[in-house]
């Protein structure tokens, strides 16, 4: 399992009864989690005095109960800043378990950027935009992966169908000191955008995709991950550069286990590019007992 254990301002304090108790900076939240099927004693005092509690409804959905929580606040991960706010369906605008993937591809980008700077004979941080590592972030949400890749030196294309999420991503970039970084923001259906990029002949050194289990595009396009993910991965491989760096697929869908992600990547990626594929569950450490809360799975391809 790949564990996101680099956080200083976020922590899973405890889990029980279908819920997780989390510390987000100065604030404590209780949110539902379908992985928490155990019912253990809620001994931590934070269970009894959260700043907010999201209650699931037996009819589906749910609602927040607020006690003492601002409309918006920020937390930091390494040199990045993320603006948080509670909104529909229990979300805060950040999936902290993804930090383990941010660290992985940021390391690859930094190494490749240093190589390109040396080849071009330019000082560190002075690589022209057209020579930077090009990264495509699909279903990019509020831009956690986008700002991580940009901070590592990449030129990032950020694509999400929700205009509000793209606006939020821009705010996170500005807060992280990346307001002038080479990030291209696109509000569009990811499949249609990829198809247009193929026709345009554009290519990327790295591709990140974090698809929802179910969703709709801006014009009502339906996305069901079990039906759509493999042909979409195949299509995205057409956008890879001649010497690509990495390909990352995330899944929060129970049926898409790590072995399934490995199988898809090894099947879809062209044999000519070689490289290695690894897939694992991703998780967050739990303070109360030292165990790890599973939070989905990721499949990674990287160049040898």
Image (cartoon, rainbow, N blue to C red):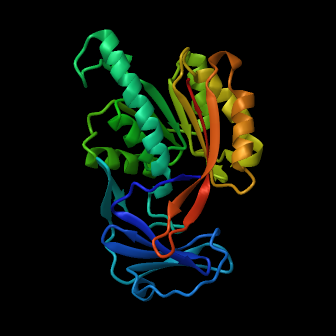
- In the rendered image, the residue lying farthest to the left is 123
Relative vertical location of residue 101 with respect to residue 132 in this rendering, above or below: below
Query: Residue 131 location, x and y as percent?
Result: 37, 16
Please tell me which residue lies in front, 48 or 140. 48
Query: Residue 66 location, x and y as percent?
Result: 40, 81
- In the rendered image, the residue lying farthest to the front is 290
* Left or right: 228 in relation to 125: right
Q: Residue at x 73, y 41 (%)?
A: 228
* Left or right: 35 in relation to 97: right
Residue 249 occupies quadrant? top right
Q: Residue at x 35, y 45 (%)?
A: 170
* Left or right: 166 in relation to 228: left
Relative vertical location of residue 128 with respect to residue 145 in this rendering, above or below: above
Quarter of the picture holding the C terminus = top right
Query: Residue 129 location, x and y as percent?
Result: 33, 21
Please tell me which residue lies in front, 273 or 129. 273
């Amino acid at each position: 399992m790949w564990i996101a254990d680099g956080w200083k301002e976020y922590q899973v304090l405890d889990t029980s009864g279908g819920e997780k108790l989390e510390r987000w900076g100065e604030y404590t939240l209780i949110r539902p989690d379908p992985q928490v099927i155990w019912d253990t004693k809620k001994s931590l005092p934070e269970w009894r005095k959260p700043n907010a509690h999201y209650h699931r409804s037996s009819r589906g959905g749910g609602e927040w109960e607020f006690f003492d929580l601002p409309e918006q606040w920020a937390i930091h991960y390494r040199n990045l800043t993320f603006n948080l706010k509670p909104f529909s369906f229990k979300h805060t605008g950040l999936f902290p378990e993804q930090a383990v993937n941010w660290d992985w591809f940021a390391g690859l980008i930094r190494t490749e950027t240093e190589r390109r700077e040396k080849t071009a004979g330019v000082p560190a941080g002075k690589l022209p935009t057209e020579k930077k590592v090009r990264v495509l972030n699909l279903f990019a949400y509020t831009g956690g992966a986008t700002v991580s890749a940009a901070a590592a030196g990449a030129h990032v294309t950020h694509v999400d169908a929700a205009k509000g999420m793209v606006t939020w991503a821009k705010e996170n970039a500005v807060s992280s000191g990346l307001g002038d970084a080479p990030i291209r923001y696109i509000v569009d259906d990811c499949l249609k955008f990829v198809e247009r990029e193929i026709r345009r002949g554009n290519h990327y050194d790295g591709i990140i995709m974090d698809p929802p289990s179910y969703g709709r595009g801006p014009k009502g396009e339906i996305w069901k991950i079990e039906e759509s993910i493999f042909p979409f991965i195949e299509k995205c491989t057409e956008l890879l550069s001649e010497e690509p760096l990495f390909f990352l697929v995330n899944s929060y869908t129970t049926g898409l286990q790590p072995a399934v992600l490995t199988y898809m990547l090894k099947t879809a990626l062209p044999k000519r590019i070689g490289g290695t594929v690894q897939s694992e569950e991703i998780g967050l450490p739990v303070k109360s007992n030292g165990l790890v809360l599973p939070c989905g799975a990721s499949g990674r391809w990287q160049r040898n």
